[in-house]
Image (tube, rainbow, N blue to C red):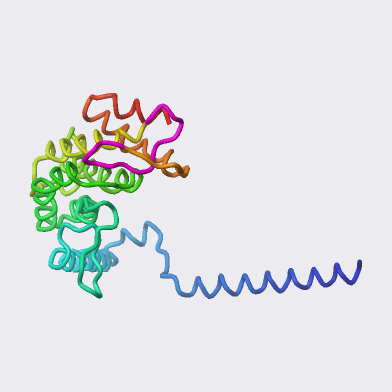
Amino acid sequence: MLAHSSSAHSVSKELANEKDKVMTDADSRLPTQLSPIEISSSNKELEWIDRQQKVKEAFSHAWSGYKKFAMGYDEFMPLSQQGVDVLGGLGATIVDALDTSMIMGLDEVVSEAGLWIESDLSERISRKHEVSLFETTIRVLGGLLSAYHLSSGDQGMNITHKALKGPKPIVYLDIARNLADHLLSAFTSSPTTFTDVVLHESSAHGRISCTAEVSTLQLEFNYLSTISDDLKYCREDVKQ
């Protein structure tokens, strides 16, 4: 027993030392964390503005590739320069990118994404086949609701403090309601939702639902009920 105990202690010590080494190596690769005072100091302001600009440039670069080779598709494969529909064909990248471009103040992207949504998305919702309830809710429905809020819909937050290009906020809300009406077919008297929705039929199916799919839809559906003054969206969701 003494020998076994000594051996176990030795192994534990070695593991602890190895863990410390890994954490030290990881820390050495991380950028230095600045305190709020250092971040707000005048001599750091230009550095942070430069970093901000680089993030915007990276975003704009990614958008330009998507727009050129894959506009309207869910995702863009840069190596093959092709678009693919892996989330039902509702232009997930466009809707997903819209609120980010609003926050960044990228007027051209806001205009291009917004006009595509206004002219194409409703028609796609009416004719597309199977989509994931979870993915479509968090990406497409959530993106539309964020765009509505950030463009000052329902007295929401326009953080750029200027008129945003693209459609009026009500356009995003109307399309969000249209999509949500199709997705409601996944909500039944069962404690769990169906996982997949056939949009053009407003029907749903699916045998297995994970906890994420069941429990993380409340944000979008509850907010939609709030801004549309229609309780049917949150009423269906809170049953789950």
Q: In which quarter of the image is the N terminus?
A: bottom right
The segment highlighted magenta reads 188-203
Expressed as whole percent of the image width and height from the top left, the position of residue 108 reads 9, 58
Expressed as whole percent of the image width and height from the top left, the position of residue 44 reads 29, 66
Query: Which corner quadrant of the image does residue 49 belong to?
Result: bottom left
- Nearest the viewer among 84 and 127 is 127
Query: Which corner quadrant of the image does residue 199 belong to?
Result: top left
- Nearest the viewer among 190 and 67 is 190
Expressed as whole percent of the image width and height from the top left, the position of residue 87 reads 29, 53
Residue at left offset 8%, top offset 44%: 167
Regarding residue 163, the answer to whether it shows in the image is no
Magenta stretch contains residue 202: yes
189 w.r.t. 120: above or below: above
Q: In this view, does 107 lie to the left or right of 237?
A: left
179 w.r.t. 74: above or below: above
Query: Which corner quadrant of the image does residue 37 belong to?
Result: bottom left
